[in-house]
Amino acid sequence: MKRVILLILGGLLLFGCQKKAETAVEPLIVAMELQFPPFEMAEADGTPTGISVDTAYALGEYLGRPVVIENTAWTGLIPSIQSGKADIILSSMSITEERAKVVDFSVPYAASGVTLLINTDSAVKGYEDLSADGVKVAVKSGTIGAIWAQENLPAQNIQIFDEVAACALEVSQGKVDAFIYDGLTTFELQKKFPETTFVNLENLPGTLGGWAVAMKKGNTELKADIDAFIVEFREDGGFEELEKKYLGEIKSVFDEAGLPSFFALD
């Protein structure tokens, strides 16, 4: 009799474990490159932090799923969702026609263009000067700045790097005339090299565009949920709070220059 009772209890326990496993919530794997402060960055101990990180956790709470941040090199972001290693990309990624061929995008949650970090001894003052003979321009591989340069500048004027830090160093040392990147980063980089660089915050023509969450093509249910989250988060003031928390200084600079903030999509 004891043996029968034990077998029954064992079966119930096994059934309970199976039921629990079946109903376990899958984590939301979020790929981002933690090299774009204050949107995507890491603390000294490696803990992810920043606007995109806070947004990812808010999205996870909305979806009822725990969030796992995967620090991923920029060129590996899209492959990470194509291969299933990540569910979404939330990494200040602009919507482009080329990217939209291989991933699906949410509605935009922010917008930005690209600007110039320029060496103080260079003859370059704005984007109009970048095509001149002898001008050297640094770009980061796979970015909007790199795409713009390849479409608008002579090939011999372009030098491609994998890291933002390398591009900035080339400018500060006068090895290139300018670095094409977003306004927030060029603004912060100039503060690191105040004697040798300056910033032109005017957006290069055709580069102002929306940032969105990217996901594997055909995942219509996830896209609908993320779209709904972005709309609700905006209406509830979530992006406004993140702007106050992380972007106070740069927002005031943009306001003085008459430039739109990152979350002004109208």
Image: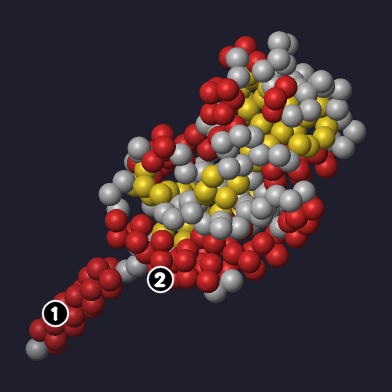
Q: Position of residue 64 (x, y in %)?
A: 40, 71
Query: Is residue 47 visible to the viewer in this orientation of the structure?
Result: no
Residue where numbered disc 1 is placed: 7
Residue type of the residue flagged with mark 1:
Leu
Q: Residue at x 68, y 37 (%)?
A: 115
Q: Position of residue 21 (x, y in %)?
A: 28, 68
Q: Position of residue 185 (x, y in %)?
A: 70, 43
- Which one is earlier in the sequence, the residue at label 2 or at label 1? 1
Q: Quadrant of residue 196?
A: top right
Residue where numbered disc 2 is placed: 64
Q: Quadrant of residue 107?
A: bottom left
Left or right of 89 in this view: 193: right
Q: Residue at x 29, y 56 (%)?
A: 220
Locate the N terminus by quadrant. bottom left
Q: Residue at x 47, y 66 (%)?
A: 231
Left or right of 199 in this view: 184: left
Q: Determine whether the residue tagged by mark 2 lies in a helix, strand or loop.
A: loop
Residue type of the residue flagged with mark 2:
Gly
